[in-house]
Every structure is written in structure tokens, then in C-alpha cells.
Amino acid sequence: MADSLAIAILAAGKGTRMRSKLPKVLHRLSGLTLVENVINSTSLVNPTRKIAIVGYAAEQVKATLSTVPNLEFVEQAEQLGTGHAVQQVIPALEGFKGNLLVLNGDVPLLKPETIEQMMTTHIKNNNAATILTAQMDDPTGYGRVFCDENLIVKEIIEHRDCTAAQRENTRINAGIYCFNWAALMTILPHLKADNDQQEYYLTDVIKDLSPVMAMDAPTSEIAGINNRKQLAEAEAVMQKRLKDELLLSGVTLINPESITIDATVTVEPDVTIEPQTNLRGNSVISAGCHIGPGSLIENSTLGENTKVVHSVVSDSEVASGGRIGPFAHIRGQASVGDNCRIGNFVEVKKSTIGSHTNAAHLSYLGDAELGQKVNVGAGTITVNYDGKNKHKTVIGDRTKTGANSSLVAPITIGEDVTIGAGSVITKDVEPDCLAFARSPQQTIPGWKPKYLRGT
Ligand code: UD1
Ligand code: CA
């Protein structure tokens, strides 16, 4: 038997039960869309062809999946059922010999090992079809699989087409199938829509194929997502899985239930993550970091031994030894050098900060370039926006800005400069200068009101 493998992922449905404008398969689970999770579950089986069947919001689904290597798209213009969806790959697979693995795009918890095992079972037994099944305590809504004690399947009947007695069967269809393509092609083109929904059901091919074998998978892996309640339940399963892996790899999670971590985040060993912390996107948290409590790190890289407390870091980089927060906000491609302190109520946007520089309190550093060992006084503001354009502030090494100073950009302040407190600095400052710009102090004696003088 030819052992080449094609994969078809069913991703054309709207997902009416999600009650969403977003197509169901683009809803996210631990940072990846449902359909990306499904694609990842095929990572161990080496397909020669990978086809996604798209329909509802096809352009949006294609754009989201455009980075998946070697993925082809087939359109199902009208969504007339899962069988109709698979019919759409027939022209694309003209002359194909081998097996077709079909995966519902809304079954995101499958492990690659389970798919691999199913393929092995399929090939070893030379089955016409092998389907993934599970015993569910509450099988409501799933298709029921009728098979004998040797797991040879007779038929699948959708929940809504089952009699009350048939609904007692708790073995459900997970929506993952491996078909011998030649065998499937004898049946697939001839499906009828004679069921409660008047759709072309892929599950209807089963009764006409032989042998069809069921393989039970763990119930935790086969959940299909039809509504947001099921999405939330699947999220809990995925989060537990990801966090258990991290714990065993040497990451400390304090009160793990209160922490969320995307599947796309890298956390090195000997990191401690405190409660109410969320790590998202393609973030990297290097060894020895201590994050939280109460922090959000999104698409950002934190160097070794960085500490972040009650702060937000997004689309940015912090080098090693950083002390961030409490209540700091680093964003917009900011790059903070090693051993910097970005403290209470400091916002850093699209700025480069040299190593050993401190901005400890109440500052805004936007579109700025700071050298090394700069001390940003409390309340220093880079005045970067004139209402139309953003302008740059450059501050040299070892310079100290006074408390409550405003640096009106574009402006360059040299090395070893001291800026007087309360200054509004509008002109460039040469290195090694003191600059201040504020009105001289007036002190007027005898100012206490007359009624307080007791005369
Ligand atoms: C399907 C199975 C059911 C199984 C369950 C497992 C059928 C008829 N039923 O039911 O036996 O227990 O999955 O989760 O197959 N899709 C298309 N085009 C369409 C219709 C659907 O691409 O015309 C896609 C959807 O985007 C989705 C997948 O197919 O990713 C499954 O469709 P859905 O409507 O959720 O099927 P279920 O009713 O859950
Ligand atoms: Ca479903």
C-alpha cells in the first residue's frame, strides 16, 4: 500500500454557536487559533500534502494561516456540511494515492502522539478508515459511534439524528479520521443530505466502508469547540497542560491557577512567576527572571535575572538584570539595556535605553535614545509630540535630568550634563554643562493673612 499521506483540515464553517463575527477556527486557545492548534497536532506524521478547506471569512482564515509552511487552500463556497467540505479536495487530490487524514478544525487539544498512534493503527490493519473516538460522560451534541467489541465500526449517527436509545451510547466521534483515499473515493462523491440538518455529513461514508476501526483517545484531547463555554473549558485543559510542563522543566509558578501562559511563550528554567501574571505571544523569559505579581508580558524578551513587578511590557526587550516596576509600562519596540531600573509610574515607548540607566519615578520617555548610566529624575518628561509629528530626544551617558524637567524634542543633551529641576529645556545642551530654565524664585515676607496675626 502506498503510504503517502495528505491532510485535510475542515475550517470553512462559521461556527454559529460561537455567536461571533470571527470565524470559529480563528478563536484563540492559549495564544494560537483553534485551527493552528489542530495543524500542530499533525507534527509527527509527515504529510506530503496539507490542505485547509476554507469558506466563511476565507480571506481572513487564509491570511492568518499564511505563515504555515506548505499549506494549500481549497474553497468551500457554500458550507453544506463536513462531507461536502471534504468533497472539495477531490480535484486537488486528482491522481493521489495513499491516505487522507481529515481533521475538524475545531478540535484543538489533540496531542501529536495520538494522531501518530492512530496512523499506525490505520496502516497496520490496512483499514479503509480509522476514526478517533472517546468515551464521554456527557456525549451530548457529538456523533455516536456504533461498533463491536473489536472496535470495528458499523456507523456513526449524529446526536440529533439518534433515537433516545441510541443516545445512550457514550462512544463519540472526535471528528478525526484517516481514510484510504481510493476507498473513500468510491463513496464520497455519492453522499446524500437526508438528515435532520439536510447537510452532507462526512460521517455518512462510514457505514459503506470496511473495515473501519475506532481508536479510543483520552477524553481530555478530543473536545470539539462549538461555543465559548467549551472554549473556556478547553483553555483550562490547555493551560494546565502547558503549566505542568513548565513546572516539570524547572519553572516555579506560585498559585498557577491565577497565571496564564500562551503556548508560544518560552520560559527558561529557574524563572519564578508570581500570581496574576500573564505571558503572551512570542515572549521569551530568560533564566533567573522573577515576574509578578500582577504583570503582563507580551511579545517581549526579558534577559536573565530581570525582575518585573506589577508592570506591563509589550513588543519590547529588556536586557539582563533589569528591575521593572512596580507600575511601569514599557512598550512599542522599546529596548532597555542591562541592569536598568524602570520604576514606579514610568512609561517607556519606542526608546533605546543604555545599560545601568535609571528612571525610577513618574517619567515618560518616548522616542528617546538614552546613553549609559543616565539618571532620569522623578517627573522627567520627553515632550515628543507637537500635535502632528513625533520628535526624538537624545541624552548622553552619565547625564542627570532634574526632577520635573521637560525636554522639548527634537533635542540633544550631551554627556555628563546636569539639568536643573523644574526646567523646560528647548535647546540642545553641550556635554559637561549645567542647564536650567525656570523663573527665578521670589520670596515675599509678611504674607500670613491679617486675621491670623492676632493683632
Ligand atoms: C462533527 C461530527 C460529529 C463529531 C463532532 C466532533 C459531522 C457530520 N459530525 O459535528 O460526528 O462528534 O464533529 O467535534 O461531521 N465545516 C466545514 N464545512 C462545513 C461544515 C463544517 O468546513 O460545511 C468544519 C467546521 O468549520 C468545523 C468542522 O467542520 O471545523 C466541524 O463542523 P461542526 O459543524 O462543528 O460539526 P459538529 O456538529 O461539531
Ligand atoms: Ca464541532
Image: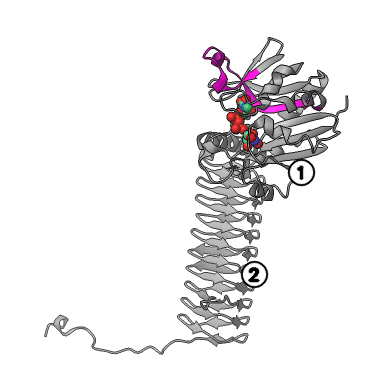
Classify residue 146 by image quadrant. top right
Decide: is 194 above or below 377: above
- The residue lying toward the viewer, choosing from 67 and 452, is 67
Q: Is residue 330 magenta?
A: no
Judge from the rendering whether residue 326 lies leftward or rightward of residue 31; answer left or right: left
Classify residue 109 by image quadrant. top right
Q: Position of residue 234 (x, y in %)?
A: 57, 34
Q: Earlier in the sequence, mark 1 or mark 2?
A: 1
Q: Position of residue 285 (x, y in %)?
A: 64, 51
Q: Position of residue 443 (x, y in %)?
A: 32, 89
Decide: is 257 above or below 439: above
Amino acid type at mark 2: Gly
Q: Which residue is mark 2?
A: 354
Q: Are marks 1 and 2 in contact (CB under 8 Å)?
A: no
* Residue farthest along the top direction in this orientation: 149
Q: Quadrant of ligand 1?
A: top right
Q: Position of residue 77 (x, y in %)?
A: 66, 41
